[in-house]
Amino acid sequence: MKTLFLIGYMGCGKSTFARRIARRLGVSYADTDALVEAREGASAADIFRYEGEAYFREAERAVLDELIGAGAAVVSTGGGLPLWSDNMARMNAAGLTVYLRRPAEQIARRMSPYGRRKRPRLCNLADEELVPFMMRDIAAREAVYAQAQLTIDCAAVSDDEALERILAALRPTADGHRNGTE
């Protein structure tokens, strides 16, 4: 199995899906945000605040490089990781990329107050600003996210069904290709 990269907007469920998939497949799981935070000894919000976004993205890129070299794993990426440099192309070349698409309203409903506070781009927004900001931000990112090899419309299916679709895409077909990706 090549590396499976889950991409999508912050709060769409990448980490939860990655843990569940890794458990089902018996492979390792990695969360790029958690790895950056552990290596830097600070939260993503603090890294953004004190070091800046460019510094965070470079640290994130270093983590991505290590994960690509490590072999089979399920990786939950930060929401902005695919947008930086050639990260999306690198992930597409190294494994299967899956875009977990959710509308802003659904993400906002799912996000806990803690989940919102830990996200540097959302933590200072008033409640009434959250969904409009997320809608604009998701729209700006859509062209990059759409480069994923598989897109799951999470608003149209249950989380369990989305999980099964991802697992099905990982199973090889008779011709050796993965289902739904080639």
Image: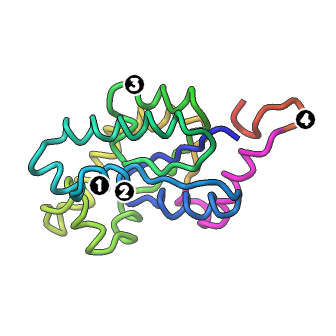
Residue type at numbered disc 3 = Asp
Quick check: 90 above or below 115?
above
User: In the depicted view, which residue is nearer to us: 51 or 147?
Assistant: 51
| Label disc, if present, on residue 86 of the rendered structure | 3
Q: Position of residue 55 (x, y in %)?
A: 19, 38
State how far apart marks 1 and 4 are (Cα): 42 Å
User: Badge 4: how crowded within 10 Å, few (<14), some, or many (20+)?
Assistant: few
**Residue labelled with disc 2:** 34
In the rendered view, does 162 fall on the left or right side of 37?
A: right
Question: Which mark sits nearer the N-terminus, 3 or 4?
Answer: 3
Mark 1 lies on a secondary structure that is: helix
Q: Quarter of the image containing the C terminus?
A: top right
**C-alpha separation, residue under disc 3 versus residue under disc 1:** 22 Å
* Mark 1, residue position: 37
User: Which badge, 3 or 2, is on the more N-terminal residue?
Assistant: 2
Q: Kindly identify the residue that appears in the image at 35 percent across and 52 percent down.
A: 33
In the image, the segment drawn in magenta is: 154-172
For badge 2, the amino acid type reads Ala
Residue 43 percent coordinates (x, y): 23, 59
CB atoms of marks 3 and 1 within 8 Å? no
Q: Position of residue 9 (x, y in %)?
A: 38, 51
Looking at the image, which is closer to me, 103 or 180? 180
Using the numbered discs, state the Cα–Cα distance from disc 3 to disc 2 in whole angstroms.
21 Å
Q: Residue at x 49, y 35 (%)?
A: 146
Q: Residue furthest bottom?
A: 113
